[in-house]
Amino acid sequence: MNASSSVLELAADRRYPAVWLRDNCSCADCVDPGSGQKLYGITDLPPDIRICRVEQTDDAVTVEFAPGGHRSRFTRDWLAAHRLDGPVPADDRTEDAKQLWQAADLAGSMPTTAWPAFQDDPEQLAAGLEALRHLGFVLVRGVPTTDRAVLSVAESFGHVRRTNYGELFEVRVEDQPTNLAFSSLPITPHTDNPYRDPVPTIQLLHCLENAAEGGDSGLVDGFAAAARLRTEDSSAFETLTHTPVTFRYADAATDLTATRPLIGVDPIGRIREIRFNNRSMQPIVLPAERINDFYAAYRRFAGLLYSTEAQLSFRLEPGDCLVFDNTRVLHARTGFRANGRRHLQGCYADLDGAYSKLKALRRRTRETNGAVQ
Amino acid sequence: MNASSSVLELAADRRYPAVWLRDNCSCADCVDPGSGQKLYGITDLPPDIRICRVEQTDDAVTVEFAPGGHRSRFTRDWLAAHRLDGPVPADDRTEDAKQLWQAADLAGSMPTTAWPAFQDDPEQLAAGLEALRHLGFVLVRGVPTTDRAVLSVAESFGHVRRTNYGELFEVRVEDQPTNLAFSSLPITPHTDNPYRDPVPTIQLLHCLENAAEGGDSGLVDGFAAAARLRTEDSSAFETLTHTPVTFRYADAATDLTATRPLIGVDPIGRIREIRFNNRSMQPIVLPAERINDFYAAYRRFAGLLYSTEAQLSFRLEPGDCLVFDNTRVLHARTGFRANGRRHLQGCYADLDGAYSKLKALRRRTRETNGAVQ
């Protein structure tokens, strides 16, 4: 193929447009070898770029572009790994990369790991983070029941997100609770801090003491409920993905609001983020004739989230630290008798750091294995 | 109106559906007086709820619901403030609440404040945060040129977001830069850390030393450029809002990726978040026949962002600390001679905390004014 062309066609389903190839050149003039960062902007490339020459070997394809004459070499492995006509690659923050679950799928087989190993053994840490990515949570057992130990768990895979509540927050009964979490009342499944944007994407809850009668914990896969809603009632799903809802939290020094849909999807419709918290939801503003549709959809989604089939129930024991994806997994607790002592410490962190750690650990494992072979 | 009804109609354009009213009851049985949080979930309300009785006074409307007989009182002020048939309320994270600008609009009148006042005077702090909200940035002058002072600026209105770079990062020339920011090369307008999700929504850059030849700063209003793209080429705007793009940053211990569109919109189409960084953008994956459309749209958007009219240029002097909305405002710098010393310290924070502080300050001002009157 030597005639000027706008596309490199290696097979009918292996086509690479000229501008795409040129923009992905990895030569040292185009990409800084030290940082791996591109050294040019899109407007530095000629707008009418074409392929004027192609050289093929067993390993690679070298392309010469016109105007300008820049030459770029692409290995066949790289081209195969970057097919354009295949399926959309999974985005591990969306439903794509998840195993959706109902309570029965995990009853008796909750993803669990032990603290010293989670901290010290890269394989155990990777397995725990993989459960967080795949199932939306992991239970770390045997964390010392000491003040602020929850921060060490967060720092083992990421960075604590400080908020107006401080680095950590205490969950125990207060005389004048500013949040129902600090009372002994039952709390239905919800995501935390929907009034924050960016919302904390990971929550940790570390049990220091749980001698109260009641106060059991529940987890619900919000992605599974949203996917089910889409199947059973697609117009309800559309309503919830397209209606902005405002959440608010205010106290003497704070006035946090965020306006986001209950079900967030990415630009190609994949479920990406659940916000669900009746306690802090503000009045919906929609034309009156659309209010009933919104409420019907909201009620239906709530019914799926609150159902017995959805909710995985268990009891946190002292030393247990639950780590969960706050954009996907809702948490709940039953009410308890306030005369029994119950004390958790919680903090927030973010998924991007946890996934980065997971990928870096896997890369290291691959490199180590490679060196051994 | 005593017949059972599904809607309270105070006027033709003042209608309030029964379920909406019931869900917004603020009595002490429905909302915890201490925390202001709702005490029930949507599934606790009867699905077929209707209004069976209405009592009106000059100040308020009291509604009785059936089934169940719950009574809720709404002041007329509250009802007027929560009209359903008016315009969609502004969301201050979207273009709604912003003054979009080109360089000429702000040349010679950059929003500027002075450090001791920003820290000590609530009115100055509120004015600075209002500029951040409205224009997307504020320049704080006179910050001591001491190590870590940038963290004090962030803490004056919010919380530092720690990342793999630590609490703060140094911007100066390094021998082996892992990022072009740490070289003397010019850097075109970009948002920071697009490979992070949640992306840091505020960036701070504090100039400690700027004796280099070159190294001037630039800011671009990404919302203005996106709005202009929508006007001039709506299909390019559609392409960029609907194409997920992956960004990546990797070093020995880190492997961060995020997949988001270059222009993020909310569920009703309002511009909400710009991600633009040629350096860390990964190969686009789209069917080959759509690649050229993507690149044409990307090039057009880049052309608007890189244009002289868009870019507000200025020079950071020692003691200047730029605080900007990293979801809206792109920043750039010209290249400089590496023999001149140039040293900035930067850190990240988040808009939700800054807006919370702004709202709490305004509330306090209103209360103080109220007490005086």
Image (spheres, coloured by chain):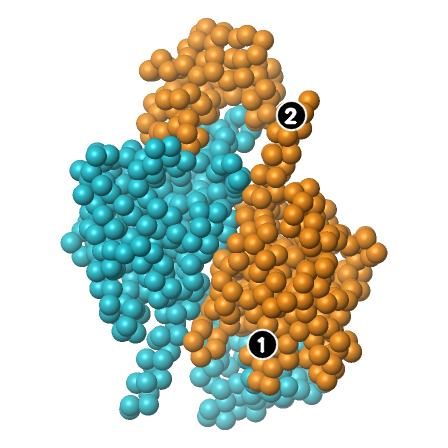
Chain colours: A cyan, B orange
Instruction: Say what amino acid the circle numbered 2 marks.
Output: Gly
Residue A121 rendering spot, x and y as whole percentages: 27, 73
Q: Chain of mark 2?
A: B
Q: Pick out the residue farthest to the top.
A: B2
Q: Which dot marks residue B370?
A: 2
* Left or right: A77, with A218 as reference point: right
Residue A207 rendering spot, x and y as whole percentages: 26, 51
* Left or right: B226, with B213 as reference point: left
Q: Mark 1 = which residue?
A: B179
Residue located 56% across and 54% down the image: B155
Disc 1 residue crowd, few under 14, some 14–19, many 20+, Cα 10 Å = some
Q: Pick out the residue farthest to the bottom.
A: A57
* Left or right: B84, with A13 as reference point: right
Q: Which dot marks residue B241?
A: none
Residue B195 rendering spot, x and y as whole percentages: 52, 66
Residue A262 rendering spot, x and y as whole percentages: 44, 42
Q: Is residue A269 visible?
A: no
Q: Pick out the residue farthest to the left.
A: A108
Q: Is residue B118 visible?
A: yes
Q: Earlier in the sequence, mark 1 or mark 2?
A: 1
Residue located 36% across and 13% down the image: B69
Nearer to us of marks 1 and 2 is 2
Above or below, A345 against A151 in this view is: above
Q: Secondary structure at mark 2?
A: helix
- Which residue occupies the foreground of this view, B352 or A260? B352
Instruction: Say what amino acid the circle numbered 1 marks.
Output: Asn
- Which residue occupies the foreground of this view, B107 or B154? B154
Above or below, B230 against B317 in this view is: above
Residue located 64% across and 34% down the image: B365
Above or below, A176 against B177 in this view is: above
In the rendered image, which quarter contains the C terminus of chain B? top right
